[in-house]
Image (cartoon, grey):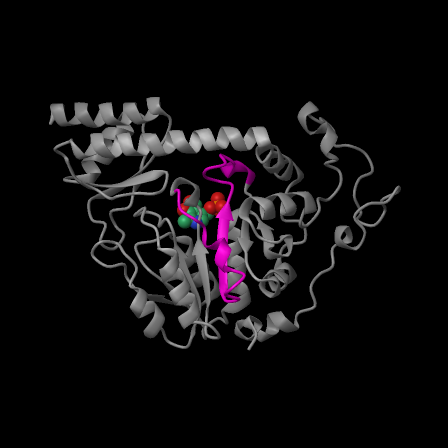
């Protein structure tokens, strides 16, 4: 059985749009895409070399090769997308028939899996995390209905911060072979100091891994993410990708970040973020208003407060905004605090300490 048997038949049958740039990427005279032949007016010095009057490569080869090298996979296993958000949406659209198919997810987790499922009209099967925020591996392996086509595993999980061990990922992928595609979202894996599941995609055709340059690589504004998966899945999703999803300046910014110098700086910043995360976890646990700090392997901490809305207001009135996750299942009283610079983190701590003193 091919993993494509899981895909929507109408997408398999679809004749993809063939963009002009795909048909002929370079020629001395470019008259095939109804572009302007001159640079844009107000051409900024920083973008002058980028030929912004031309449509970009739909899947820029240089970036694909760089990402493939970075993630240790072959270049035919990489689909570059507008953030990993777009890859989640593409997967839903390619694999879930509205009103028929479903996804499985383990709340509390990243909200976009549910949003993309709702937009596509796919049902949501929830297999909640256990009391320690661990995955219910057995339930995912043994009790999903046949309608489930995609299983999202978030590792490290947003917003709880825990990782799914590779043995569990492999067990789930093996149990669901021929039945569902398992997608491991590794948006924060750089902060976990653990191996990626990307090494498993060669052994499991029903496994895909989401990566992004938005977090550790400090490029959230460029919107560059990717899906690593078997070549059949990559080719299928390319059929439904927008004709020119990646803007030229974003691709240039990504390539600049992925040079040797960029990588060295990123490694230093990851180490700094991890050190700050550990410092903050210890300091927060000492505050009387803090009931719990979940162990995190990401660039954030999920913190349970005695009174989360009070802590939220204290921080906001001091100019610090954090994420209220208290309405998510099992996260009553919790706020998610991103790890910023040392100064930003210290400011957050001071505000909480002062807020306690004033109470
Ligand atoms: C777990 C997870 N996956 C994916 C994303 C989306 O990231 P992006 O679209 O910026 O790559 C986020 C963003 O916060 C996230 O937390």
Residue visible at 53% across and 66% down? Answer: 205
Q: Could you tell me if residue 114 is visible in this image?
A: no
Residue 42 against residue 7 in the figure, above or below: above
Residue visible at 79% across and 55% down? Answer: 23
Residue 108 against residue 41 in the figure, above or below: below
User: In screen coordinates, is 317 left or right of 29?
Assistant: left
User: In screen coordinates, is 68 left or right of 290?
Assistant: right
Q: Position of residue 174 (x, y in %)?
A: 43, 69
User: In screen coordinates, is 182 left or right of 3?
Assistant: left
Question: Considering the image in quadrants, where does the N terminus appear?
Answer: bottom right
Residue visible at 61% across and 54% down? Answer: 74
Residue visible at 61% across and 65% down? Answer: 232
Q: Could you tell me if residue 205 is visible in this image?
A: yes
Q: Camera-side residue: 36 or 277?
A: 277
Q: Position of residue 259 (x, y in %)?
A: 60, 33
Q: Camera-side residue: 11 or 200?
A: 200
Magenta segment boundaries in residue numbering:
193-222
Residue 221 within the magenta-colored segment of the rendering: yes
Instruction: Give the quarter of the image for residue 254.
Output: top right
Q: Position of residue 225 (x, y in %)?
A: 54, 47
Q: Position of residue 271 (x, y in %)?
A: 40, 32
> What number of labels is visible?
0
Q: Residue placed farthest to the right in the image?
A: 28
Residue 14 within the magenta-colored segment of the rendering: no
Question: Considering the image in quadrants, where does the C terminus appear?
Answer: top left
């Amino acid at each position: 059985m091919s993993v494509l048997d899981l895909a929507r038949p109408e997408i398999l049958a679809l004749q993809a749009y063939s963009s002009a740039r795909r048909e002929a990427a370079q020629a001395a005279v470019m008259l095939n895409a109804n572009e302007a032949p001159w640079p844009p007016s107000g051409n900024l010095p920083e973008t002058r070399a980028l030929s912004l009057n031309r449509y970009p490569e739909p899947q820029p080869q240089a970036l694909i090769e760089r990402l493939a090298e970075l993630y240790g996979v072959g270049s035919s296993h990489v689909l570059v997308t507008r953030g990993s958000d777009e890859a989640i949406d593409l997967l839903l659209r390619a694999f879930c028939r509205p009103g028929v198919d479903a996804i499985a997810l383990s709340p509390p987790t990243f909200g976009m899996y549910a949003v993309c499922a709702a937009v596509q009209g796919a049902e949501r099967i929830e297999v909640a995390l256990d009391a320690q925020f661990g995955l219910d591996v057995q339930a995912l392996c043994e009790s999903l209905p046949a309608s489930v086509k995609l299983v999202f595993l978030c590792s490290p999980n947003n917003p709880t911060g825990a990782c799914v061990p590779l043995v569990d990922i492999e067990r789930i992928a093996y149990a669901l072979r021929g039945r569902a595609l398992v997608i491991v979202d590794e948006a924060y894996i750089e902060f976990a100091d653990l191996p990626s599941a990307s090494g498993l995609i060669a052994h499991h055709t029903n496994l895909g891994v989401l990566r992004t340059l938005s977090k550790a690589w400090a490029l959230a504004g460029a919107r560059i993410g990717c899906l690593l998966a078997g070549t059949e899945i990559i080719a299928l999703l390319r059929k439904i990708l927008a004709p020119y999803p990646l803007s030229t300046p974003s691709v240039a910014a990504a390539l600049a970040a992925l040079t040797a110098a960029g990588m060295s700086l990123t490694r230093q910043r990851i180490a700094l973020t991890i050190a700050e995360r550990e410092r903050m976890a210890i300091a927060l646990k000492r505050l009387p208003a803090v009931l719990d700090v979940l162990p995190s392997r990401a660039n954030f901490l999920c913190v349970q407060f005695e009174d989360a809305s009070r802590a939220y207001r204290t921080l906001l009135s001091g100019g610090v905004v954090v994420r209220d996750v208290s309405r998510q299942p099992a996260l009553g009283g919790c706020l998610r605090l991103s790890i910023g610079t040392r100064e930003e983190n210290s400011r957050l701590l001071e505000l909480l300490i002062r807020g306690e003193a004033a109470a």
